Amino acid sequence: MACNTNHTDTTQSRQPIKLAVHNLCHNCQPPSGTTNLLGLGLKYCIVPPKANPNIKNCIKKLAYRVRTKQYLLDNDTINRNDYIPQLYVKIKNWNPPPASTSTEDRMTLFEKRLREASRINTLQTHHFTSLNPLQRQTLNEFKNSKEFIIIPKDKNLGPAVLNRDDYISQVLKEHLLTPTYLKLDSNTASYRILQTTRNLKNTFQKFKHLLTKPEIDFFTRSFSDSHRTPIFYGMPKVHKTPMQLRPVVSCVNSFPSIFSSWLDFRMKELLHLIPSYIKNSTELIKDLQCLNLPRGAKLFTADATSMYTNIDTTTGLQTFTKLFERYKDHIPNSFPKEFFLETLKIIMNNNIFSFGDTYWQQLQGTAMGTPAAPLYSIIIYGYHENTQILNTFQQNLIYYKRYIDDIFGIWVDSPNTTWDEFKHTLNQFGQLRWNVEDRTTSTNFLDLQISILNDKIETKTFQKPLNLYLYIPPTSAHPSSCFKGLITGEIIRYWKQNTQVKDFIHITQLFIQRLIQRGHRIEDIIPILQSAAASIDNIQGDRRWLQQRVPSEDTLYIDRQYHPLDINKNSIHEIYNNTLKGHDNFQKMLIAMSRPPNLRDILCRTNIPNLPGRNTSDILEKIVKDQDSRVLSP
């Protein structure tokens, strides 16, 4: 059987030229090879030298899908509408019955052939090396050390490394020891988490008659999972001087996140009531291309100051109540308003989390990190925009859109309302305040530079000055399709974003240079660029958008964790075609390659490792004593 050879070059010959990391350590310095390792980027995947595929897990998932498909076909009374992808949770410990004897025999034959091919492949003498000796040594040093915090920077600007104690101190001083948070002892935290869980369950029992069957299944199945306490961490904002930390609460696998995910699902049904909402820069470009600008039109942007902590829950709940009343004719009668509001109240008032060995509760603002937070903030302030801004200033606002806490608009003067009145009205919503850029003919919003030239809108790609451009190097254990997708996707994005062809050519040339600096060879890049150019040429009309391909329900996915020396996709397809194809009730088969562990998985710890005498509680106690001594000193 053939093996993949895309990554068989020596690691040394394909190493990136450009390696960069933000070293934010002031005391103990990280290992000497830090830049060589972290400069690869936190998405860099690492695999053992030899392929060792988990065929048992692959076949288990394959059998589950084939048998489930057969079960659904045999039970045509099952309502296929009882499926909501965002809320779907598998039935715990449920396994479909065996498929037909013929299908089971074919699956057995597929497994046999796959194991034979893998066994032959492992006998080959090729070895794949993800890291050079210095990088391997540095990786081991970081894994064995508790002195450093490795974390991705805010705005997706690459990796940063900080001293553990300095990081803890900054989180405490900058965030947790402010009036926004309350410290809890472990017993109080456990009690409040338990009470929150009980309140949410009781609320569900009280209102579940208002929910659909898929929603009820989502809740009841999720209740049986194990759950953890949310964890607080800070992401370095290196574009700020001095460096600040963006507060984040990781709510993944926590009990409140079950209900917050449901809120997020239901809020999507309300987005059509918020005309200021914009999903991404692609939608923005499409809108701007249709605009006819009057003379004197100017651009402006605004960004909110700490939006989440400055939208208090009382205002938020009152706003949703008003929204349900004002737009009752635009919201289905089946929308469970009472359950929605009660759940929202519990989630927003009970954001309890850990930081190291300490526990805290957020007292002010939107519960950070909870799945519902982005849409909550969009809709809450959107109601203020609907009732106070868009109507009052409709003669001024040629265009007005907001992406969470960033506003972009096009303004034209009128005799009835002024620019100062507009800025004042923006800030008439509770404690939330906006930093408004003055009107201009060129500004940056999201990943675009937007300009007015000859009374027309032109756009070009905007890239942040601190962007390190740490594209995945070719030595990373990623399937070749990932590199092709990265390059093709960027080229098509640049084509959409740049009005002028010269700007498209310029940013594409920079992109190619940066890829080469990251170890990619021009002879490998050129065929992908040609394929991307063909995709652009095939778009009907100069600015028609590529349509997304939606996978068919009748597609069988075969899961494999990628290894560069494992048998390739063509070999697996051949085995499938000669064994299972036509016997599995699927129209198509795709191989779903999962990535191996990357540097972020290995090195970025959400929770802080304990060190005797230097735990978070120890550092907190020292900070409080220092603050008290300064207050008491004459």
Image (tube, helix red, strand yellow):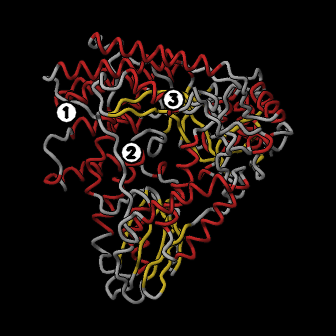
**How much space separates mark 3 and mark 1, taking CA atoms?**
37 Å
Residue 284: % across, % down = 40, 66
Along the line of sight, the residue nearer the viewer: 31 or 543: 543
Q: CA distance from mark 2 to mark 3?
A: 56 Å
Nearest the viewer among 579 and 249 is: 579
Mark 2 and mark 3 lie on one chain; the one further toward the N terminus is: 2
Instruction: Name the residue beneath numbered marker 3.
Output: 571
Q: Nearer the viewer, residue 608 or 574?
A: 574
Element type at mark 3: helix
Indicate the quadrant where residue 473 lies: top right
Residue nearest the viewer, comparing 526 with 453: 526
**Dot 1: element:** loop
Looking at the picture, how far across and down is residue 582, in whole percent? 30, 25
Which quadrant of the rendered structure holds the N terminus? top right
| Element on which disc 2 rests | helix
Q: Nearer the viewer, mark 2 or mark 3?
A: 3
Determine the CA span between mark 2 and mark 1: 35 Å
